[in-house]
Image (spheres, grey):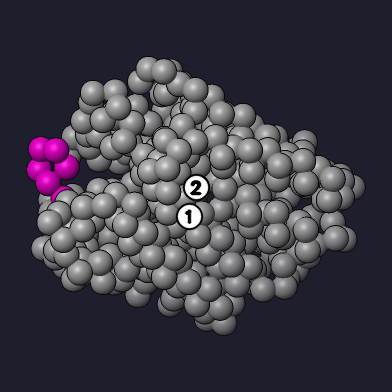
Amino acid sequence: MHNLTPLALLLNVGHAIDHLFMLIFATAVATIAAQWGMGWNDLMPYTMGAFVMFGLGSVPAGKLGDQWGRRAMMIVFFLGIGGAGLLVAIAQTPWQLAAALTLMGCFAAIYHPVGIPMLVQKAANPGFTIGVNGLAGNLGIAFAAILTGFLVKHLGWRAAFAVPSVVAIGCGVLFALLVPKEDMAPAKRKGRQLDLPREVMARVFLVMTLTAISGSLIFNFTTNGTGQLLSERFRGIIDDPALIGTLLAAVYTIASFTQLVVGKLIDRFPLKSVYLPVVALQVPLFLLASQAEGWLLFVVAIAYMAVVFGAIPFTDAIIVQYVDDRLRSRVTGVRLAVSFTGASVAIWLLGPVVKSAGFGVMLAAMAAIAVCTTLFVTFLPGPVRAPAAAE
């Protein structure tokens, strides 16, 4: 891995692609549903399989990343998610769509347990490296909103899947050509474990798992629901779907830069002292958003997405700080399997909950979840020397 520039660039682009693919459907669902004579609330549950596999697939992906090699797995990621996206583009029925989205979720599961450990493997400033990577992922979310809105309007929803698929396949080819082969798989290298008491590690894994579950619930509710929230609360002010998509992209883009600030803070201050205020701020902002409309909601949405995105680097930072590199893909995979599988319930519930109770109730529920996250973070142990520095 001597040629770090193409590696870092492609890994960050890969994070953007990963999140972009997982949110194309959420942005295009109203158009697809209208074309098929359904309500968006009724079609939304068909994407649950994608998010279940996004979680469950992380375990084998992490194991293969450590034991087979991270470079090979990243090539599989790019080519696989691109191929699955092309299958989504040719789906003719809701169940064909569900099957293709589920396959896409299988390949999307590869990135987080493989790409992030590969990126921070020899990073001098892991917090900021994670922050930049998180920014890239969230720009993928923002780009999903604006690109999907544009493609749906001018070329149809199928093009919204087909165009990014071609880009992903091209990135896979570039990764194979530009990123040098690994000398050996991470699990086969000689490493150095941190000598931490078992009870400390148990607390770390418990906090990591619980915050990952609650954080993923909030992340999936907000990233899959904010577009429809803006559409509903801007009705009569802005009714153009493409313009709503642009506003959504602006929310995500502005909020994404929080991760750079958080990354810098993680490298300078104890993890817990930075993590607590970020998650605690989610509570009043969700409660405010539950009552806001129009342009006030737009401002509040930027604020709540800033703290939602700002919380993302912490779980990866916990893994970097407490887990040896030889195990990071597997530990990340298990963490993601638990959190994303639980959070897939949020995707399944989003349509029915909003349909029956409205966005106000959903946002109040997210405030309650954020209270739980804040409580979980208080149990995080004190700082230790990062394994990346020891290696």
Residue 151 at x, y percent in the picture: 45, 44
Instruction: Determine contact: label 2, label 1, CB under 8 Å.
Output: yes
Q: Is residue 205 above or below residue 153?
A: below
Mark 2 against mark 1, which lies toward the viewer?
Answer: 1
- Residue at position x 80%, y 62% in the image: 4
Does the segment drawn in magenta span residue 355?
yes
Q: What stretch is highlighted in magenta?
A: 354-359
Q: Mark 1: which amino acid? A: Phe
Q: How crowded is mark 1: few (under 14 residues within 10 Å), some or many (20 or more)?
A: many
Q: Residues within 10 Å of mark 2 (few under 14, many from 20)?
A: many
Q: In this view, does 58 lie above or below 37?
A: below
- Residue at position x 53%, y 73% in the image: 260
Residue 242 at x, y percent in the picture: 34, 52
Q: In this view, does 369 lie to the left or right of 83?
A: left
Q: In this view, does 335 lie to the left or right of 388?
A: left
Q: Name the residue under label 1.
A: 143
Q: Mark 2 points at which residue?
A: 20
